[in-house]
Image (cartoon, rainbow, N blue to C red):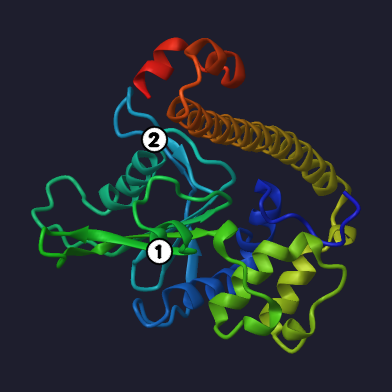
Amino acid sequence: MAGVYVNPFTDFGFKKIFGEEASKPILLDFLNALLGDEEGQITELWFKNNEQLGHSGEAKGVIFDIYCEKESGEKFIVELQKNKQDWFKERAVYYATFPIQEQVTKGDPKYELKAVYCIGILDFIFIDFETQDEKTAWKHEIKLKNQFGNTFYDKLTFLFLVMPNFNKKEEELYTRLDKWLYFIKNLDDFQTIPQIFKNEVVFTEAFKKAEIAKMTVADFYIYQRNMRAFMDYDGIRNYDLRITREKAIEETTIKVEKETMIKIAKAMIDIGVEIKTIIQSTGLTEDEINDI
């Protein structure tokens, strides 16, 4: 809590910087940096109701972190995800159904849908990709494609930004998106505005929005609660990671020791040492020695 700027990985911090009415220029700049020429430059955004009710009494509703629409009707869901959840991909697909279905009115035979972008800023690494390039990538763009790799439907896009994989230093920030991800990842560690941001009006405004000292008392207490929850979760995650690492080290050590004992046993067998002596010397069982 001694930092100068909010932690953007808290619900409060993220929405304070990107999700308020006064934050529109900041969010707009971030989305333009993320989408590049794909969507064309967005010049205006409208925040929409981020609470979406299910389409029947039994259907589950959702609350988006940020839900907005550009001037020509394309819709953007922006979500911050602190931890990997079960059914994460299914949840992302389910979220996408709400801005799609709301575009179709009853009795309208046309399905002239506007594009939907589901954007996830993730504080965890995907662990279910196959290739090393996929595992280490910090940006994943996903569309509906056929078996030939051609896009079947180009109006639904999932964009996942994997923040633990983004490790660029200040001198390596070449694009606008590089700067935004560097800002998000390191904001709560900054004590002053880095030189690279000082002549950028949008970034200096984002830093102003993020200043803890300028919060109202009510906002500060909300942020404190958010930070306590964040640190509790971070502590649990770090503990789990430490236990996992220790278990992996222990299993590797046991495996290496076992392989070493097998090599020693083979050498003792070659020179005719009795099985009883080999068991005492290596700790291997009689069956294991017989297998050798």
Q: Which residue is found at the position 35% from the left and 57% from the top? A: 131
Kind of residue sitting beneath label 2:
Trp
Camera-nearest residue between 35 and 131: 131
Quarter of the figure that contains the C terminus: top left
| Residue at the limit of the structure toward the front, as seen here | 272
Camera-nearest residue between 267 and 247: 267
Q: Position of residue 126 (x, y in %)?
A: 45, 49
Disc 1 crowd rating (10 Å Cα; few below 14, some 14-19, many 20+) is few
Label 1 secondary element: helix
Q: Quadrant of residue 203?
A: bottom right
Camera-nearest residue between 39 and 178: 178
Q: Position of residue 2 (x, y in %)?
A: 91, 53
Task: Give left or right: position of 42 versus 18.
Answer: left
Between the residue at mark 1 and the residue at mark 2, the CA separation in whole angstroms equals 23 Å
Camera-nearest residue between 271 and 21: 271
Task: Give left or right: position of 181 versus 228.
Answer: left
Q: Which residue is found at the position 70% from the left and 49% from the top? A: 12
Q: Which residue is found at the position 42% from the left and 80% from the top? A: 36
Which comes sooner in the sequence, label 1 or label 2? 2
Disc 2 crowd rating (10 Å Cα; few below 14, some 14-19, many 20+) is few
Q: Which residue is mark 1?
A: 133
Q: Which residue is mark 2?
A: 87
Q: Quadrant of residue 282?
A: top right
Of the two numbered discs 1 and 2 in the rendering, the one whose residue sits closer to the viewer: 1
Q: Position of residue 97 (x, y in %)?
A: 30, 46
Kind of residue sitting beneath label 1:
Asp
Q: Which residue is found at the position 64% from the left and 67% from the top? A: 23
Asked whether the residues under the numbered discs 1 and 2 touch, taking CB atoms below 8 Å apart as contact, a structural biologist would say no
Label 2 secondary element: loop
